[in-house]
Structures are given as C-alpha cells and as structure tokens.
Image: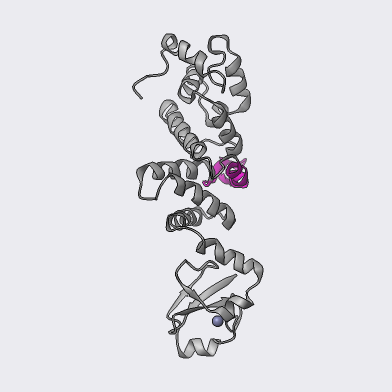
Amino acid sequence: MIYWILRHTGKWHAWERGANKSLCGTITEYDLRMYPAKDIYREAALPAGHVRCMRCTNKMTPTQIAACLVHENNSPEVNDWIGLIRRHLAHKRVSLAKQKVVALAQRLAKIGTPQEPKARIAYERIKALLLTPRFRRVNSGSYSRNLRVLPEVAQVIELLPLEDEQAMQKVVTTLTLWQKITKRNVAHDNGRPAQIVKTILDVQQPEAYIEHLAGRGIDHLAAVFHPNTFNRAKKETSLRGAFDKDGAEYWEELKGQLNVVSDDE
Ligand SMILES: [Zn+2]
C-alpha cells in the first residue's frame, strides 16, 4: 500500500506504509518533521493531473503501478462514481476489490453523471442489489450481517458488458418496476444478485411478468427473478410466449385482452 506526499516542489512522492522514507529516498521521516508535507493522499491511486516523482515511480512494483493507474486512466465522471461507491462501502463497513469498484463506476458513467437523476436512480438500485449487506436473524435472536451479495459482484459485472448500455438500464428499470408493483424494496429482499440479473435480462415484458406473478402472490425479489419462476411463467397457457425473447409478437396480440400493460407509459 502506497501513500502520496506532496512537497513544495509540486511533486508527489510515493511512501510505502510503514516505511521510513519515500520510495526514491529523497524524503525521510526527519525531513517530514522539519518540513511538513504540503498534502498527503492516502490512496494508492493518485487522481489524474497530479505530478508523480519519476524516481519514486521507477521504484514502484508492477502491482503498485497498476493500482495507481486505475484512477489516472478514468474520466472525471468515472472517478466521481468511484468516490460515491467507496464512501457507501466504507459506511457499510464492507470492502470490495478496486477493479470491481471501477467496473461498476464505468457502467454507471455510461448512464450519466452522479448529478443526473436517471443515473442516480440507477446507482440506488445497483447499490441496493449489490453493495448493501443484508441482515438476517440468527438463532440467538440477534441479527447478523449477510455478505453474500458481494462475492457475486464479478458475475453481475460479466452479465452487464460495458459496451451494452441497454443491459444495465434494463436491470435498473425492471427493479424500479418491481418496487412499484410489489411495494417492496430491493435493499431488503435477500437473493442472489447474479441470478436475479440474469433472469431480468431474459424477461422481455417485465411489467406484465411482475404483475402476473404479483397477482398470484409471488412478489419476493428472489422468487420473481428466479429462473424456475420464469420458466414456469413461460409455460402457463394463457401467457405462453409472452415473457421470453420470441414472444413479443404474441404478446402484442394478447395484451389488450389481459389488460395488464398500460399503453400510456
Ligand atoms: Zn520521490
């Protein structure tokens, strides 16, 4: 782990945690006591636009350089999202590998900046689905944190390719619809995010699908977006073909009679 120390020269020197001098050897603990650092940045990845000491950089290991470049190559929007995600994770006291944080930030940046409502809603859903540990009651009657959501982040990222902007948007829209129809909250329902996301991407008529299940008393997030539920819904005679990729045309004919999809949306 590396920290960055700004000297009066305007250059940032790398300081390994626990070391007694900068990587380049130019600054020692004694120097820092005599001439306090102008600034200290406690992250391996120095934000773009800052000048790194070249002698320090040359001493960095490939891993340290990779960690450093993670931020430097990102656009300001991506870095804004990285900051928001990290603050949320710190608040929830959970950690997530930097690459995964960056991958999520890049996908959010495709939807918009943190100031744009559309992107903000996307962030709220993704945060609730993926980055928020659930609580579950244990035998003693107290609650324990269930961190199962985090290990699935990588699988979810894989399901949402960066170049396919529609995929991420579809997940967000569907989760919002589900909340609206069932009056439940993504952050409160347990489930396996990767399985939920995969099923969401398979469902072609999310509103009709969720309404259909809610009418039958199925509304829990994990139940609605479980592959078995989806497969069973596809087989129901009255709605055959309505929810899968080939059923769009069939559904067009059927939706007037079923009256579960409103055209004004
Ligand atoms: Zn240096």
Q: Position of residue 110 (x, y in %)?
A: 46, 46
Q: Nearer the viewer, residue 230 or 94?
A: 230
Q: Residue 152 sits in which quadrant?
A: top right
Is 91 covered by the magenta stretch? Answer: no
Q: Position of residue 265 (x, y in %)?
A: 36, 25
Q: Nearer the viewer, residue 163 or 50?
A: 163
Q: Position of residue 29 (x, y in %)?
A: 54, 86
The answer to whether residue 186 is seen in the rendering is: no
Q: How is the image coloured?
A: one colour
Ligand 1 image position (quadrant): bottom right
Q: Is residue 188 above or below residue 63?
A: above
Residue with the most extreme left position: 264
Q: Nearer the viewer, residue 39 or 138?
A: 39
Q: How many marks?
A: 0
Magenta highlight range: 131-158
Locate residue 66 relative to residue 90 in the image: left or right. Answer: right
Locate residue 264 relative to residue 217 in the image: left or right. Answer: left
Q: Residue at x 56, y 23 (%)?
A: 245
